[in-house]
Image: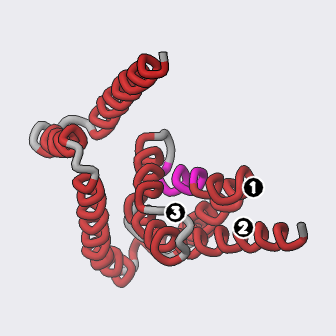
């Protein structure tokens, strides 16, 4: 019992420490931090496999709210239940809260400082590279499924957003509807086989 409690405390501390560090040191938005979460929780800690992380990314992206917070809720719950979700969300939300509070206090000095402006412009290049890395890895994972439907949907979604300017939210909603229809078809097939 004591060992179990210590183990859970260790998991909660690792969750908080990891999400706090990722959130504090990441620039560029949700997909960047999700990519780094994958490196930490899949490759380094081994808590999740690639498929689980892909599912978490999909759910976090299609749910309302910031992607890192959504991913933290799911990841924390997966590792330590409600307490895990709470700890992961606090770890993720705390650094931006502190940073924004400091920036808002010294807003005029930040806005007019040419070094800060230059640093932000340079960071954009790094952010673009990280997002490109995320896109390539997600596409590779979809291709690994060898499902013609999933691969076709990936290309159709890209064409719809890039060439026709259709909102990403509409594309995600379309994919959700297709996913629900496929699930219902699978459930119906399973029901017929059991009868």
- Furthest toward the left, the residue is 163
Circle 2 is placed at which residue position? 12
- Mark on residue 48? 3
Residue bounds of the magenta highlight: 66-74
Element type where label 3 sits in the image: loop
Dot 2 crowding, Cα within 10 Å, few <14, some 14–19, many 20+: many
Q: Nearer the viewer, residue 36 or 92?
A: 36
Q: Nearer the viewer, residue 98 or 162?
A: 162
Q: Earlier in the sequence, mark 1 or mark 2?
A: 2
**In the rendered view, would you say 153 is above or below 12?**
above
Q: For residue 39, which quarter of the picture?
A: bottom left
**In the rendered view, would you say 121 is above or below 185?**
below
Give the Cα separation between the discs numbered 2 and 3: 15 Å
Circle 1/circle 2 CB separation < 8 Å: yes
Q: Position of residue 42 (x, y in %)?
A: 48, 69
Element type where label 2 sits in the image: helix
Give the Cα separation between the discs numbered 1 and 3: 18 Å
Residue 51 visible, this orientation:
yes
């Amino acid at each position: 019992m004591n060992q179990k409690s210590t183990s859970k405390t260790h998991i909660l501390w690792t969750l908080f420490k990891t999400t706090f560090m990722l959130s504090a040191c990441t620039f560029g938005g949700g997909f960047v931090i999700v990519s780094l979460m994958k490196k930490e929780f899949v490759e380094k800690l081994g808590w999740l496999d690639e498929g689980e992380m892909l599912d978490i990314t999909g759910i976090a992206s299609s749910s309302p709210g910031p992607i890192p917070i959504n991913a933290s809720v799911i990841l924390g719950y997966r590792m330590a239940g409600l307490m895990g979700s709470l700890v992961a969300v606090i770890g993720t939300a705390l650094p931006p809260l502190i940073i924004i509070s400091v920036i808002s206090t010294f807003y005029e000095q930040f806005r007019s400082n040419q070094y800060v402006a230059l640093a932000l412009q340079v960071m954009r290049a790094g952010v673009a590279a990280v997002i490109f890395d995320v896109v390539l890895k997600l596409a590779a994972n979809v291709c690994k499924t060898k499902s013609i439907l999933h691969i076709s949907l990936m290309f159709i979604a890209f064409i719809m957003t890039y060439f026709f300017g259709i909102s990403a939210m509409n594309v995600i909603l379309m994919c959700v509807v297709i996913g629900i229809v496929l699930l219902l078809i699978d459930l119906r097939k399973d029901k017929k086989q059991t009868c």
